[in-house]
Image (cartoon, rainbow, N blue to C red):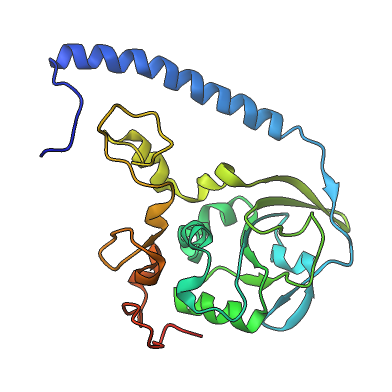
Amino acid sequence: MTTPASPVTSQDDFEQHLLELRAREKAHTREGDAIAAARRRLPMTEVPPDATVVGPDGHVAFVEVFDERDELVTYSHMFHDGRPWEEQCPGCTRNVWNMGAAADAAYLNGNGITFAVLVDGPYDEISAFRDFMGYTVPWYSNAHLDDPTVGVPGRISCYLRRDDGIFLTYWTTGRGDEVLSPSFGLLDMTAHGRREVWEDSPAGWPQHPTHAVLLTDRHGTPGPEEHGRPTPQWTRPGVTRLDGIPDSARP
């Protein structure tokens, strides 16, 4: 109850201020629609026809990732070879956590779009990590590739099949990846926002270092790396506190 908050006002005054903000929100939505329209008109570039990825059956042509659909959306997960699960990329873990189950991709599938994860690590390690996290969407290794059209780490990429060719139609990274983390949008609606230092918030608002909550203890409290692990992992079976002793979550 000691955390700073906005001043209290009447309901009528509150609604008036909200209406003023709503006009800006509507303009923001319409600008987003205009940007999406421009995105649909971008030219596209061809993926090398001999591009392959590694799946459960070894090397397969990149077209196999489409799973017979016409479009494909991928997220490219960073991976640290040979490192324990708690030392894998917390940002990538957060992003994929929200699309890791087949049910989460159902609406994409219904529109003829496959969602898959590309990972720059050896397949035996990334498949073990996928199973530990409980993901059911397909994962493929692209560690052997060095082509900007196929799975640069940290990117969302969109592809289209046309005749015998595959084309990259769009990619984004950085804050463009936030579409995979809907909690950000909800946090932005709350009284204190994301609670990060970069935000323009009133004096005294609670703020912590950017992305601090990506790595937490089992109670969700941000802390030093030796006491934390990527936040979604605390819900997985076999996860324990970190005390220097290998646990069942380690590869």
Q: Is residue 192 above or below residue 29?
A: below
Q: Locate residue 168, reporting x and y percent.
A: 78, 49
Q: Locate residue 176, reporting x and y percent.
A: 58, 42
* Residue nearer the viewer, 117 or 191: 191
- How many numbered marks have been drawn onto this rendered protein structure? 0
Q: In percent of the image, x 76 and y 59: which residue is there?
A: 150
Q: In percent of the image, x 62 and y 55: which residue is there?
A: 154
Residue 50 visible in image: yes
Q: In percent of the image, x 12 and y 38: which residue is there?
A: 2
Residue 135 visible in image: no
* Residue nearer the viewer, 211 or 11: 211
Instruction: Tell me: 187 left or right of 135.
Output: left
Quarter holding the N terminus is top left
Instruction: Tell me: 148 left or right of 201.
Output: right
Q: Locate residue 84, reporting x and y percent.
A: 50, 79
Q: Locate residue 238, reporting x and y percent.
A: 35, 83
Q: Which image quarter: residue 39?
A: top right
Instruction: Tell me: 121 left or right of 32.
Output: right
Q: Which image quarter: residue 216?
A: bottom left
Q: In percent of the image, x 58 and y 57: which residue is there?
A: 109
